[in-house]
Amino acid sequence: MEDLELAKSSIQIVTDPQQGDGDSGKKSPPSIFTRLHAGYFRISLSFGGQVLLWKTLSEHVYETQAIHFILHIHTFPSMAFLLLWWLSLCILILLSVLYIFKCIFYFNLVKAEFLHHVGVNYHFTPWISWLVFLQTGPFVNENDAPYHILLWVFVVPVVLLDLKIYGQWFTTEKRFLSMVANPTSQISVIGNLVGAWTAARMGWKESAVCIFTLGMAHYLVVFITLYQRLSGANRFPAMLRPVFFLFVAAPSMGSLAWSSISGSFDMPCKMLFFLALFLFSSLICRPALFKKSMKKFNITWWAYSFPLTFLALASAEYAQQVKGVVASAIMLIISAISVLVFLGILIITAVNTDSLLCENDPCLGFMDNNYKT
């Protein structure tokens, strides 16, 4: 028996170095590129949304006497706003540069991400992040030519992705919406609505109406499809359930987009806002839905932040239009929740930086298989 154990140990000693030599001969790409995906732009989108929220609240604070009375402030700190703006810009540029390098050197991973029914939707987030950030700049004039050029640079890819995804939904049998629908499908709708919102704010009404129509038409189809199969069937991992808050983001952004197009927060805007408020209330009343996804930190947690920020922005527009105590209270509560959630996730992310590019990211299953082949 002792001889047999010695033989087994000798076999292990011989075979392990051979395996190590074989592995060392293969050059594996850096983990920052194999683990980075378009879903990380949720971080920059959350930062841009918070900057825009601070900017909007600072513009409305004088006109909303209830909030002025409760907060006892005259203006938001300008230095804090500028610090958040510069931090948002740095994060957005860093993520954009890293993802461009990934597209150049590891195109097979980007292709695998693009062909996946969940990963393809996140390809809208870089362009949405830049469109939101365009509206936050303290040094940018919306009437300048560079601003118009940048708008087209960021809107055109959204329209091209629309042609790709929406076309597949009703022409390709394996890509029918009923087959691939999941909560992340709403990101494409949000991209259209953000584009319409940005175009309307710079005075391009016709282009804004065109993009808004495209987004809202598909939002109705996506919303009804997801409502019938809310859990996303077996194609949606439990770790990705924070993206259910996209149900809040789409109608919130729709109300903001139509408000910019029509020039006032009229009845359609209020209807979309109340829908978003109802969906938000429905989600927070079901914490068990997110129990599994909250056991361990994941980048998906950032999906909580920017939908709440969009809802807070819509509540600010609603309070500006209604000018009542109840509307101001709703604005204050939702804005406070949005800021607290943003700060909480930011602190948790800073504490768990080693988990930012983790191997168990549920968004990476389709990319890992592609890389191994």
Image: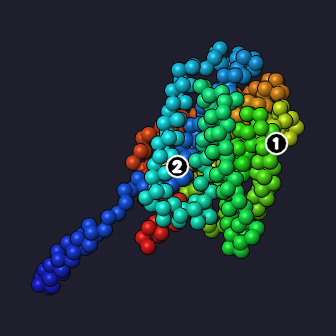
Q: Which of disc 2 and disc 1 is earlier in sequence?
A: 2
Q: Which mark is residue 268?
A: none
Label 1 crowd (10 A; few <14 / some 14-19 / many >=20): few
**Residue under pointer 2:** 40
- Could you say where residue 319 lies in the image, as x and y percent from the top left? 78, 28
Residue at (53% x, 64% y) in the render: 111
Please identify the quarter of the rendering in which residue 153 is found.
top right
Q: Amino acid at mark 1?
A: Glu
Q: Please give the name of the residue rendered at 15% of the width and 83% of the height, measured from the top-left corner.
A: 7
State the quadrant of the N terminus.
bottom left
Report helix, strand or loop for mark 2: helix
User: Quick one: SS at disc 1?
Assistant: helix
Q: Is residue 64 left or right of residue 116?
A: right
Amino acid type, mark 2: Tyr
Q: Quadrant of residue 336?
A: top right
Sort mark 2 into few (<14), some (14-19) or many (20+) by Cα contacts within 10 Å: many
- Could you tell me residue 260's position as x and y percent? 78, 35
Q: Taking 234 as reference, is 277 above or below it? A: above
Residue 44 shown left or right of residue 32 in the figure = right
The residue that disc 1 covers is: 206
Name the side, left or right, on which 253 lies relative to 364: right
* Residue 101 spot, x, y in % from top left: 45, 52
Instruction: Give percent across and percent down for residue 28.
Output: 35, 63
Residue at 83%, 32% (x, y): give it.
263
Residue furthest to the left in view is 3
The residue lying toward the viewer, choosing from 91 and 17, is 91
Camera-side mark, 1 or 2: 1
- Which is more toward the observer, 14 or 233? 14
Q: Is residue 200 visible?
A: yes
Task: Calculate the distance from the C-alpha at mark 1 to the C-alpha at mark 2.
Answer: 32 Å
Tell me the quarter of the image containing the C terminus: bottom left
